[in-house]
Every structure is written in C-alpha cells, then in structure tokens.
Amino acid sequence: MADDKPILLIVEDDPGLQSQLKWVFEDYQIVQATTRTEALDAIRRHEPAVVLQDLGLPPDAEGVTEGLACVEETLALAPHTKVIVVTGHGDKDNALRAVAAGAYDFYQKPVDTDVLNLLVDRAATLAALEAENRRLAALSGHSPLDGIVAVSPAMLKVCRMIEKVAPTDVTTLLLGESGTGKELLSRALHDLSPRKDNAFVAINCAAIPENLLESELFGFEKGAFTGANKTTPGKVEVANGGTLFLDEIGDMPLPLQAKLLRFLQERVVERIGGRVEIPVDVRVVCATNQNLQNLIAEGGFREDLYYRICEIEIDIPPLRDRENGVLMLARSLLDKYAKKQGKPLRGFSDDAQRAMLAHRWPGNVRELENKIKGAVIMAEGRQVTSEDLGLADSESVPSLNLREVRDGAERNAVRQAMVQTAGNISRAAAALGVSRPTLYDLLERHGIESAEFSRAANAD
C-alpha cells in the first residue's frame, strides 16, 4: 500500500460491513477499529485525515452513547480530523447530535458505497487544504513564543508573564533547572519588546574565567593590561539599545557583582583602564539554576544585587512537572528533526510514549531534544520506539482512561475507610458519606473483603 495515500480510519464492529468497506476505499490507507479504545489508539498512532465511524459501538452497540463519546474524544485528541458518522436508517436526531459535537458529516444506512466514497473524498480534500493553510499561516505569522510548547498551566503562566513583561524595561530574573529553556525565554522577552530591532547579547557568567569576565562585560582601553592592543567595548556597551542576557548569574564572582550593581544603579560603565563614564541604555535579563537565597545566606551572592536583578522573577518548571508537556514537546521536536533529516516518521510508538512519560528528564528540554535527535537518526520504522530513544519501556505510567482513574480512586477511598475503621461497616459508610447498602455494593464491585480489615486490626 502506497505510503503517500491519505489514511482513513474505519470504526465499525460489524465484520461483514468492515470487510466490505475495506475494499471500497482503494485510494486510502485503511486502518480499522471495532471499539472506542481501539479507535483512540489508532488516532494516536496513525493520525488519520478522515474517520468513518458507526455510532453503535460495543458495549452499547444498540445505542449511541459509546459512539458519541468516541466522536467527542476523537475530536478532543485530534481536532482537525474529519469524522463522518454512520447511523441507522431514520436515526437523524443522533446524527445531528454527532454533528453538533463536532463531526464533519453523517451518513444513514443502508450503505451506498458510491455516496460514501464521495463523502470521504470531500472530507479528505478539505483536511488536506486546511493542513496546508495552517502550515502557511504558521510560516507567515511566526511569534517569538512559537518555539515554546506550553500546554501545562505552569508553562502557560510563564508565557503569559513573558508577554506582559516584555514591553517593559524591568530587570527580569529567570529561575529554572539546567535545560529548561531559560535562554529561549530570554530571547522571547527581547523579540516581544520595543528593543527587538537592536542587539540581543548573551554572556554565560560560568563559562568565562574570572580574570576575563570583567573585560568581557565592561571592555577595556588600549594599554590597560598586557595584550590590550586596542580599545575594546564590552558586552554591556555592545548591547546598547537592546537586551543584555546574563546567564548563570549565580556564578558571577563577588568583586564583579559590586561592579554590576553599580552599573544597574547608575546605568554607566567604565572600561578597564578608562576614566570616562559611558552611559548605556540596555534592558538586563538574568538567569540561574541556583538558589540565590541560599547563596546569599552562604555569602556567595550580594543581597542588594539580588533585589536589583529580580524586579520581576519568573520560575520555569522542570519538564517532569509540565503536565502533558513531554509528549507535546516531543512531537514538535520530532517534526522538526524528521524534516531536517528527510525521514517520513509518523510519531511515537506506544512503548516510546510510556518510556517518555516514565522518565524523570533530569536534563529537561535539552535532554529530550538530544534524545529526539538521536532517535530520528536511529529509527528504522515509521514510528520512533523506546529503543530508538535509548529509554527503557515502562508499564508503570498511570492510565489516562477516565473510567479507570475514577474506579481506582473509588477503590482506594473504600480501602482507606475500611482500614481507618478496622472494617466497621457503619463507621466506614459514614466516613465515605454513603449508606451501608451502598458500601456493600462498593465492596463487592471492587472485590474487597471486609473481613480482612477486622483480621488485620485483631492482629495488631
């Protein structure tokens, strides 16, 4: 089957109809599913342009509850997918409910393959046009924050702060672990500011030897020291009119901290060996992965300088604390590097997704980016696997199925109540806010024996 054919997902539990439809759509790569769970797995794995879905799905094959839920979850997962629902003869009301929920179109049985083919072709054409429009819009409407994938509340808060702070000249301190994207955010602060057409100058205070850092920052006059053959402006002067980014500010030597403090107060610099004060108009952004409050307590950082550089303080969460952020960022990086390498990769396998969710990412975004770069090179199939990433697969990632999550929470609550009351049904029911009969039902549903709790209490 040609890889350049659009993908069509057929969600149908009738084997006869499923077999018939498989041979109708010769111009498509056919993927099949019989349940909502299988359908959502196929959406994640294959990213179909069009979904042809029966509303009657097990375990509610005679109704539409499961089918409508599948439509809603499909569109929540892949909002640009075109879903065509297939309903029973005369079931127009439920078809309209599906369209109201976001389905692209509907078709009523009995199946006329010519009409169905026409509907699918039209949906696939529209999906391709919309995808091209989104691509062109992204190229023409580039934003300084486009490279920052923010889906968790914590990262969305960071982006909102960047947008609010950028137009001002307040000195900003970015706090976060190594590899969390501090320089990327500092550039966004510059690119969103009125200074965007002037220089953005970055200097890593930890990467330059102490005896050279002062001349790098403030410059020097000719003859100021051996080897000073010509007058050289420092980074602060070069950034005049723009933004100066001081990375790893926590590693700046104490003597130099005093000179930086004077510059921040007076907004003038003196080159080494010079006697003239040079006024400089520059916006200062600092970053560190250290706890400056602890450094202050230990005498390693000036408290007065701290209050000068943190007029606005922005905490950047580590990658492991960004809900859903790992997979979204991984997909963005995969698209980027697969395109560079010219490899037609279609996302991540299930084991790769489990491995990424289980990994702690001590190196944060930088570590993830390096893993993706290597995986793109190593991948032999259409999907990146956990082996390609160099990560161990893990089955310990919590389920995302809401029903399983609710059942697990309910089971834990019942067990906890039984433990606290030593198996006393009346007291446990009261603690849970339910009646005794309801508690008995819950115990039976979750396979919990009340006697084991009273035995445990007696053993204690």
Image: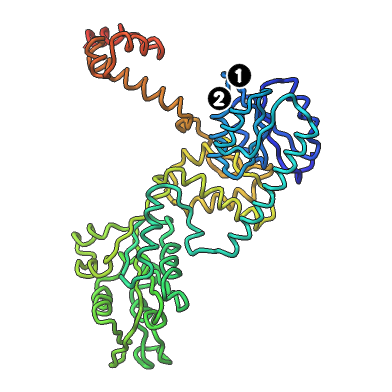
When the figure is inspected, residue 428 is found, relative to residue 284, above or below; the finding is above
Q: Amino acid at mark 1?
A: Ala
Image position of 418 with respect to 178: above or below: above
Residue 49, quarter of the rendered image: top right
| Image quarter in which the N terminus is found | top right
User: Is 404 positioned to the left or the right of 292 in the image?
Assistant: right
Q: Which sits in the foreground, 356 or 79?
A: 79
Could you tell me which residue is drawn at 37 percent across and 20 percent down? 411
At label 2, the amino acid type is Glu
| Few, some or many residues within 10 Å of mark 1 (<14, 14–19, 20+) | some
For the point 24% across and 60% down, the residue is 295
Tally of numbered discs: 2
Quarter holding residue 21: top right
Task: Please tell me in which quadrant of the rendered image residue 278 appears.
Answer: bottom left
Determine whether 414 is above or below 11 in the image.
above
Which residue appears at 77% of the width and 34% of the height? 115
- Label 1, secondary structure: give it: loop
Kindly tell me whether residue 256 is visible in this rendering: yes
Residue 66: numbered disc: 2
